[in-house]
Amino acid sequence: MDLTSKTIAGLSEMLQKRELTSKEAAGLYLERIAALDPSINSYITVTTESALADAEKADKRLASGTDITPLTGVPISVKDIFCTEGLKTTCASRMLEGFIPPYDSTVIKKLKDAGAVILGKTNMDEFAMGSSTENSAFGSTLNPWAEDRVPGGSSGGSAASVAADLCAASIGTDTGGSIRQPASCCGVVGLKPTYGRVSRYGMIAFASSLDQAGPLTKDVKDAAIMLGLMAGRDNCDSTSIDASVPDYAGSLQDNIKGLRIGIPNEYFIEGMDKETEGLVREGIKTLKDAGAVIVDISLPHTEYAVSVYYLVATAEASSNLARYDGVKYGQRVDIGSGLIDMYKATRDAGFGAEVKRRIMLGTYALSSGYYDAYYKKATDVRALIKNDFDEAFKTCDVIATPTAPAPAFKIGERTSDPLTMYLSDIFTISCNLAGLPGISLPCGLTEAGLPTGLQIIGKFLGEQDVLNTAYAYEQARGPITQKPKL
Ligand code: GLN
């Protein structure tokens, strides 16, 4: 087996036995990135120098045999939305050109403290707005399984870098599906934790009541390892939850006998891709055969989720993105006469089309006279969507659905019609609106060789149930033998 295709757990074992040094591991990934990434474009920045320095430090730690975590010396990639001290952070926007954060986001700090080696910053949709990574100022990322297709988004670079073995694992963010949908498109595991489980401090904000960071990994155990290291209360983020962090990886088990899995009929809709539906239903059968009890449930307000999301998310985005004015961060375009002209010119040149569209939609939804009709109404319906889940969880322990209605689409196929693009997230958005944890698992390839995803949604702080169900599925499904041909 190629070393670069190993899991975190697999690499960690070799590193701890000193069969491989962290520096050697980092070198292998960096070579592979140099050879393959020019065509896939999963990285915006490869941080060779600091990666090798991180690896050297990790090797000393490994040699000392103390303070070792499963991530010590393991090379990972991180979405370019996380502030990294001394390393350029772009959020895939021209707006942040030249921005070098003076501090690490909490998640980055935690992963570095655990001994992770950061290989670079991955490509994404600008400010995490999109489902295809086509809205990047640094060009599209290609899907490693089919280079004429998108990797999903917005964490498409992270998902592609894991699928193409250009890192052992990655981290992304998920506001409406941006970890799970690209994980599904690229055939990897992607976990969005409960809102507040992981600190948002230093993670560039898109929609603050929805944003959450999580891992993209090669298997479920790695997701459990990563989450355990990322999660926890942080005084720098008042929305982070003050609850102890379980040993997710240590508690992982595949006995799901009697576990009640709810299947919402609203998630198997007219017009969805038939092959995807078939593969997801097969996945559910695998869970049933492993001992789970399948129960029919209803999430009746699902049909409003996309509309609610595009009001709440754009409203919050319009406020969050007000800070990019050419004064505090990144680029400034100083033409015209005076401050207002400078703001206008900077924002016009700095933001891409989708970001501008969202700022306008959000500003409109919040404007006086429309606030009650749009934003307030959306937050009311959001409460109904959350309530649907509370009701459903009275009769089931976790919920299983498709992650996306279809496999990865062709590059360019949806760029001219934002609405069809928005519909890619139809099955992932409710989870964010309700603040619940969800995971996407690879559940087979279509005839054309494209990955599909099975989503497991859990209760508030129910990550362990989600991971255990996912682990049980993975064990029952057996190892994935196909790899993208690169
Ligand atoms: N695709 C969704 C959007 O465009 C979700 C993005 C995300 O989760 N960051 O907003």
Image (cartoon, rainbow, N blue to C red):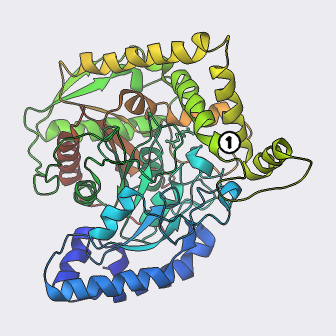
Q: Nearer the viewer, residue 429 or 295?
A: 429
Element on which disc 1 rests? helix
Q: Nearer the viewer, residue 187 or 90?
A: 90
Q: Is mark 1 within 8 Å of ligand 1?
A: no
Q: Quadrant of the N terminus?
A: bottom left
Residue 446 visible, this orientation: no
Vertical arrangement, residue 390 with respect to residue 32, above or below: above
For label 1, the crowd category at 10 Å Cα-Cα, with few meaning under 14, some 14 to 19 and many 20 or more, is many
Q: Position of residue 437 (x, y in %)?
A: 30, 38
Give the quadrant of residue 18: bottom left
Q: Is residue 379 left or right of residue 229?
A: right
Q: Position of residue 317 (x, y in %)?
A: 59, 36
Q: Position of residue 74 (x, y in %)?
A: 31, 75
Q: Position of residue 374 (x, y in %)?
A: 59, 15
Amino acid type at image mark 1: Val
Vertical arrangement, residue 17 with respect to residue 220, above or below: below
Name which residue lies at 51% across and 39% down: 406
Numbered marks: total: 1
Q: Is residue 350 left or right of residue 446?
A: right
Q: Nearer the viewer, residue 440 or 149?
A: 440
Name which residue lies at 55% across and 59% down: 143
Disc 1: which residue: 355
Vertical arrangement, residue 324 with respect to residue 356, above or below: below
Give the quadrant of residue 5: bottom left
Residue 316 visible, this orientation: yes
